[in-house]
Amino acid sequence: MANNPAFNRLSKDARGGYAGFRTGDGAGASHATADQMSAQQLQDLYNAPSAVRSGTERPVTMDDVVMKTLGLFALVVGFGAVGWAVAAADQSLGLMVWMGGMVATLVLGLVIAFKKTLSVPLIVTYAVVEGLFVGAVSQFFNSVEGWEGVVPSAVLATVSTFAGMFLAYRLGLIKVTAKFRRIMTMAIMGYAVFAVVNVLFAVFTDTPFGFGGTGGLGIAISIFAVGLAAFSLALDFDAIDYAIRTGAPQKYSWLLAHGLIVTIVWLYIEFLRLFARLRE
């Protein structure tokens, strides 16, 4: 989600007309085109097979996105329980699941973002691997002395933040403009680079949480990360609205659901780190 691949792909394909679907103004554009057609052309168009019969996929709806999101979320939670159980039974194996999941989600995320064709199996695989990763990480945070209770706190904070951001977006309190999108993209990309460097720093210096540790600087970094992840939800909501408005094919519901799940998990992880730092 470093630069919202869902919106980027939707925007690019919308300009190309989604291989036959409406773009831009929609009905107005259709009327303008009809005015330029001859009577014979209109008759030929009327006699042509319907979009469904000719194999054209129907436009995406909100129900499509909701159902795909719930499906991917169920995979994350289900395999999260597996990751938790593995980490609880064997800490070394749990660490392997944690580190392996982190690398795998990074690679799969890049492939999904830059692959020319949308791959549902890759998106489903990502949800499975992400679930294992989240479960192992959550179990680790829960097992550290003094950090008991951070997992349910992070879950509650994530749900509350999601609900608050969705309400703010729907009420128009947060407007996703081109400027807002550019600023968020640069901020997320910058934080992504920082996160990679921070992980390497933490590993090689054996410093909990990396830069800032559990001090004031570290807490400030976590608060910034939580805010960044929270406002990224607005980008996901806007991408969903954009897809529905421009008549994107139904298959894009998978990409939209994937982007939303990735942001939710990112927000949850940042809340885990923030609450653990505060406990210290």
Image (cartoon, rainbow, N blue to C red):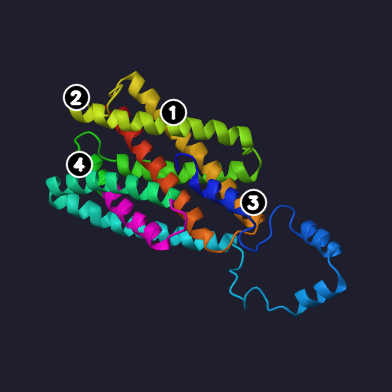
User: In terms of depth relative to the viewer, which is nearer, 107 or 165?
Assistant: 107
Q: Which mark is residue 177?
A: none
User: In the rendered structure, which amino acid carries the disc numbered 3?
Assistant: Arg
Q: Which residue is mark 3?
A: 15
The residue where tag 4 is placed is: 143
Query: Which mark sits nearer the N-terminus, 2 or 1?
Result: 2
Q: CA distance from mark 4 to mark 3?
A: 50 Å
Q: Position of residue 253 (x, y in %)?
A: 52, 59
Residue 134 drawn in magenta:
yes
SS state under label 1: helix
Mark earlier in primary sequence (1, 3): 3
Q: Name the residue at 59% across, 45% down.
A: 167
Picture quarter with the C terminus: top left
Q: Disc 4 or 1, which lies upstream in sequence? A: 4
Mark in front: 4 vs 1? 1
Q: CA distance from mark 3 to mark 2?
A: 48 Å
Q: List the residue tagged with mark 2.
A: 205
User: How far is disc 4 from disc 2 in space, using C-alphas?
Assistant: 22 Å
In the rendered structure, which segment of residues is drawn in magenta? 115-135
Tell me how far mark 2 sits from mark 1, CA to CA.
Answer: 23 Å
